[in-house]
Image: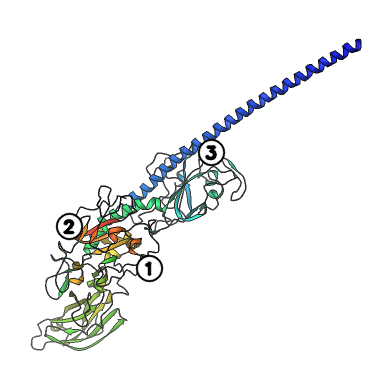
Amino acid sequence: MARSGSGAAVARAASRRAQHGQALLGLLAVAVMVFAYVLTSRLNAASQFVALDREDNAKVLARAKQALSGYMAQQAALPGENNPGHLPCPEAPANFGTANEGIEAPFCASQAVGRLPWRTLGLDKLVDASGEPLWYAVSNGWHRPSSSATLTINSESAGQLALDGVANDVVALIIAPGPAITAQAGTGCTAWAQSRPTSGAPDFRNYLECENANTPADASFVSNRAGQTFNDQVLRVTVADVLPALEAAIAERAQREIAPALRNAAFVLDSNSPRRWVVSSSNPPIYPYATPFGDPAASNFQGAAGTYQGLLPFAPSAGFVAYAATPADAVETMGNGTIETQTCSWETANEVYVCEGEYKKDSVDPSLPMRIEMTATFTSVAMGFRSLDPARLQAQARNVNPNPWINLAVNYQADMNDGGTAGKPHGSVTVRFWADLPNIPAMGWGTKADFLVRIERAAIDDHCVLSTAAVACAGSDTSWFARNQWQRSFYYAVAQTNTANVLPAIGGCDSTNCLRFNDPATRNIRLLLVLAGRRLDTQARPVAALSDFVEYQNGALGTLYEQRPARYTRTSVPALNAPWNDRLVLVDWITPAPTFPLASLP
């Protein structure tokens, strides 16, 4: 019996131990559940915080992107800005932690990476969710690499940065760097323990990770790096993002600066016969013929007779304008003396022609003046924007060799030809220039003296609006236009009766044959331009047809051209949400004055 009681006690003790173990297991299960709940709650909260951080960063990045586009447009519209479309350089490294923080470096090397120049952009100091200022990368070709460098930016320009392997799209990147982390080595990533010093030039590896921190900096960036320590939040700025604002600025600037220069480039003819190219006249202007339309990237920009709509006739005169024939020998035109001998030849083949010889005064009345004259005809003058350079017309005289030459005052006359005279083709210009030779007795030269007359092909020169070097043209430096090749983005339309087609009459458009702007009834535009802008999704590059260049009515080859501001609708134009980015520049018109286009509208 005693044993039996002892066994029961053992059994009860074992039962108590089992119950205690089960209680411990239960407590452990509860603890695990509580821990899992807390951990899950915290992870969810952290995830929510990360999402909120990225959302806040996205807002800050978008604000910086908008400011960058606005800065570009504002700078492009400024008079004298020779690199319209350029983006600022990153903050100058020496400005970090100083009173100049946020001011761009005046120039930056290729593949420029640095902090966003927030002060230059007119912003408050923008920081990401971790409190770090934004970083910024800008493409080659879109920033100023040196004090003397010039850029070529137009509607066809491409970005040279690549984001996640997509190239020729990105002109800039804005980056929220996030808090400092220790980057681990891996695919595309170099190990780096980031630190954030408060002075000295900042090292971008302390802020950016993986391909974004390549050293030296290159043109390849990433927006994520799966499986790697990476917290950069990247916003791309593409060509399509910035060109609408840039093109609006270019159209407004073309209205202010290029339109007056083109008016200044018109051929003004007087009412005498033959039609004389003069400095000023009340007669209607004659503008060059248009260049036959084709892909601007392959065009020679040479105007062609009978073409009134197409590309700008921006071909340089060299290689296009030429002598119709060898210039005639010099002649004496007043009968008060004689040319005793002369030799005429090319000083430079097809460029400079010279006649040199000996003259003798009239023996009856040697006091009378003797005049010497030369004539040459130049082809294709009416096919481009030209000017006449009288410095290329020269006359000299001297006592017989080896005495020094004396430069003589030269007078000239230039007549535009209608093609009705042999040797003077349509649209050519005949230049006649003359000078009075020194009176031999009065000069004490004896009985004979030497003369020389010279004419250069460059007497018919490019108008200043074609210049790519700084030049004053109708009150402005217009070199930015040709140097950035904006002529490739403009369509040119001229009234037929304001071209050499009207010769030998003095014409000019009127209410029956002028071009029209936004109004089907009122014809009063002599010349206008259409900024075709960047390629729309519905258009091809290379340009295959006019519809790949300008939109709808502007490509109808008629006389009506339209700007489509939001306030303006007509049943003949597509709905306002149809693809459209043409901007009009009005160059010349007759009364009543047209309502000018709002070039800044999208």
The disc placed on residue 434 is none
Q: Amino acid at mark 3?
A: Pro
Q: Earlier along the polypeptide chain: callout 2 or callout 1?
A: 1
**Helix, strand or loop status at disc 2:** loop
Measured in 3D between alpha carbons, the distance from the residue under mark 3 to the one under mark 1, in whole angstroms, is: 51 Å
Crowd band around label 3 with a 10 angstrom C-alpha radius: few (<14), some (14–19), many (20+): some
Q: Is residue 507 left or right of residue 220?
A: left
Q: Residue at x 56, y 47 (%)?
A: 225
Q: Amino acid at mark 1?
A: Ala
Residue 243 x %, y %: 37, 53
Q: Quadrant of residue 60?
A: top left
Looking at the rendered image, the disc whose residue lies closer to the viewer, 3 or 1, is: 1
Camera-nearest residue between 110 and 342: 110
Q: Amino acid at mark 2?
A: Thr
* Residue 327 vertical placement versus 23 (above, below): below
* Residue 592 vertical placement versus 300 (above, below): above
Q: Is residue 157 left or right of residue 45?
A: left
Residue holding disc 1: 298
**Residue 182 appears in the figure:** yes
Measured in 3D between alpha carbons, the distance from the residue under mark 3 to the one under mark 2, in whole angstroms, is: 64 Å
Residue 559 x %, y %: 22, 62
The disc placed on residue 522 is 2
**Helix, strand or loop status at disc 3:** loop
The extreme top residue here reads 1
Crowd band around label 1 with a 10 angstrom C-alpha radius: few (<14), some (14–19), many (20+): few
Residue holding disc 3: 179
Looking at the rendered image, the disc whose residue lies closer to the viewer, 3 or 2, is: 2
Q: Earlier along the polypeptide chain: callout 3 or callout 1?
A: 3
Looking at the rendered image, the disc whose residue lies closer to the viewer, 2 or 1, is: 2
Measured in 3D between alpha carbons, the distance from the residue under mark 2 to the one under mark 1, in whole angstroms, is: 35 Å
Camera-nearest residue between 342 and 48: 48
Camera-nearest residue between 497 and 406: 497
